[in-house]
């Protein structure tokens, strides 16, 4: 015991010396303001929170989140949904909206209940413009300033060289774009994480030329290395009888700090109702034996205290908001979700089979 105590004294002496000699904001790890649990902004869609954090009570964290996919896969709307959650949690927050596509009408912001007076719209034409302005903005922010950044989109931004070559009527291939993208994220990533700022980037995907082709986010390795979360969006038709009433947009978690990678989570969006708050919960509830699935589209509730199955049968649409709100709030359901979706979870249920997802 005496030797352990002596070792600790020596260790603390060294730590104090290192801290004193540092010219930076150095602190013991257990006391560091940059380490530990990150602030999360929950949405009102439980399975969207699961895709972000592995928990129905989680949400959007600081750092880089990339939403990638083909055109018309609801990427911008999902980004605005996440931003809306952040701005509702922090009423003083502002949004930096960098726009290169100009495909986000006022109705998108209204649909997500975003106060446009708190959105700074910044048109951009190339990656260098984005880099110079965003680095300047982040450098002049302090930890505690509530800001969220959206770039719509990274996939459509040219490099300055590409634009200059076009003006000079040169057709040489641009080899600089990936380097500029990597440089951008090298510069902004420390600011985002040290100042607790979420960054949402819209990106595109391409199919690899392998025997078994897969979708990869365009933009180079810099984007992959920097991102905390990468979603590759798929979709499948949502039909009533033979009529298409909307889509299930399937979030494929390609990379995450919190969620088991390659998890697929469907979020239903209909023409009339928008985002279905309770998307994806039915499949999870069946897998966790909170609901029994019967033939021909019928379901029965299972009492979690006794394990008894109710006699009454329900259609999916009859499982109302009251039922889902009560189920999602139970500790048993929360634990089941975390055990199956978190990175360090024990199990792994499959909510959506990969072969069900269209590109």
Image (cartoon, rainbow, N blue to C red):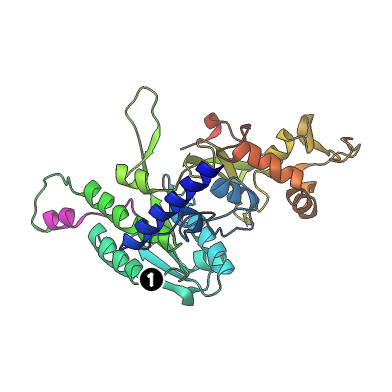
Looking at the picture, how far across and down is residue 118, in whole percent?
47, 75
Q: Considering the image in quadrants, where does the N terminus appear?
A: top right
- Report which residue position mark 1 lands on: 141
Q: Is residue 274 left or right of residue 64?
A: right
Q: Can residue 246 be seen in this view?
A: no
What residue is at 60 percent from the left and 39 percent from the top? Answer: 341
Residue at the limit of the structure toward the right, as seen here: 311
Q: Does residue 153 show up magenta in the picture?
A: yes
Q: How many labels does the image show?
A: 1
User: Which image quarter: residue 275?
Assistant: bottom right
Within 10 Å of the Cα at label 1, are there few (<14), some (14-19), or many (20+) other Cα atoms?
A: some
Q: Where 226 falls versus 80 (above or below)? A: above
Along the viewing direction, whichever of 20 and 47 lies nearer the viewer: 20
What residue is at 80 percent from the left and 50 percent from the top? Answer: 323
What residue is at 73 percent from the left and 43 percent from the top? Answer: 333
Looking at the picture, how far across and down is residue 241, in whole percent?
68, 39
Looking at the picture, how far across and down is residue 183, in whole percent?
25, 53
Q: Where 171 falls versus 294 (above or below)? A: below
Residue at the limit of the structure toward the front, as seen here: 2
Along the viewing direction, whichever of 279 and 102 lies nearer the viewer: 279
Q: Give the range drawn in magenta.
A: 151-166
Q: Is residue 181 visible?
A: yes
Looking at the picture, how far across and down is residue 81, in whole percent?
54, 59
Q: Where 154 falls versus 255 (above or below)? A: below
What residue is at 41 percent from the left and 60 percent from the top? Answer: 194
Local SS, label 1 = loop
Q: Does residue 183 show up magenta in the picture?
A: no
Q: In this view, does 181 lie to the left or right of 290?
A: left
Residue at the limit of the structure toward the top, as seen here: 211
């Amino acid at each position: 015991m005496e030797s352990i105590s002596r070792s600790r004294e020596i260790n603390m002496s060294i730590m104090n010396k290192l801290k004193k000699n540092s010219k930076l904001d150095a602190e013991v790890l257990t006391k560091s303001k940059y380490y530990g649990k990150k602030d999360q902004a929950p949405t009102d869609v439980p399975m969207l929170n699961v895709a972000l954090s592995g928990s129905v009570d989680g949400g959007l964290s600081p750092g880089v989140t990339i939403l990638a996919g083909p055109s018309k896969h609801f990427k911008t709307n999902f980004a605005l949904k996440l931003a809306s959650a952040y701005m509702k949690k922090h009423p003083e927050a502002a949004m930096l909206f960098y726009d290169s596509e100009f495909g986000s009408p006022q109705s998108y912001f209204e649909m997500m209940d975003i106060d446009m007076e708190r959105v700074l719209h910044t048109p951009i034409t190339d990656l260098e413009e984005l880099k110079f302005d965003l680095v300047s903005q982040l450098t002049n922010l302090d930890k505690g300033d509530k800001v969220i950044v959206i770039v719509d989109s990274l996939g459509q931004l040219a490099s300055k060289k590409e634009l200059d070559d076009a003006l000079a009527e040169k057709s040489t291939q641009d080899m600089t774009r990936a380097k500029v993208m990597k440089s951008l994220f090298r510069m902004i990533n420390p600011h985002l994480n040290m100042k607790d700022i979420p960054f949402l980037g819209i990106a595109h995907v391409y199919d690899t030329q392998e025997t078994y082709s897969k979708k990869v986010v365009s933009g180079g390795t810099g984007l992959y290395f920097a991102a905390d979360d990468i979603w590759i969006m798929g979709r499948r038709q949502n039909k009533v009888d033979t009529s298409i009433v909307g889509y299930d947009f399937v979030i494929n978690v390609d990379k995450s700090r919190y969620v088991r990678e390659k998890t697929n989570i469907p979020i239903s969006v209909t023409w009339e109702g928008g985002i279905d708050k309770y998307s994806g919960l039915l499949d999870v509830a069946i897998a966790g034996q909170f609901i029994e699935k019967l033939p021909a589209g019928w379901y029965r509730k299972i009492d979690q205290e006794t394990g008894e199955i109710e006699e009454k049968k329900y259609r999916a649409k009859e499982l109302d908001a009251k039922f889902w709100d009560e189920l999602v709030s139970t500790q048993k359901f929360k634990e089941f979700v975390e055990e199956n979706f978190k990175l360090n979870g024990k199990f792994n249920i499959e909510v959506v089979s990969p072969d069900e997802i269209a590109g």
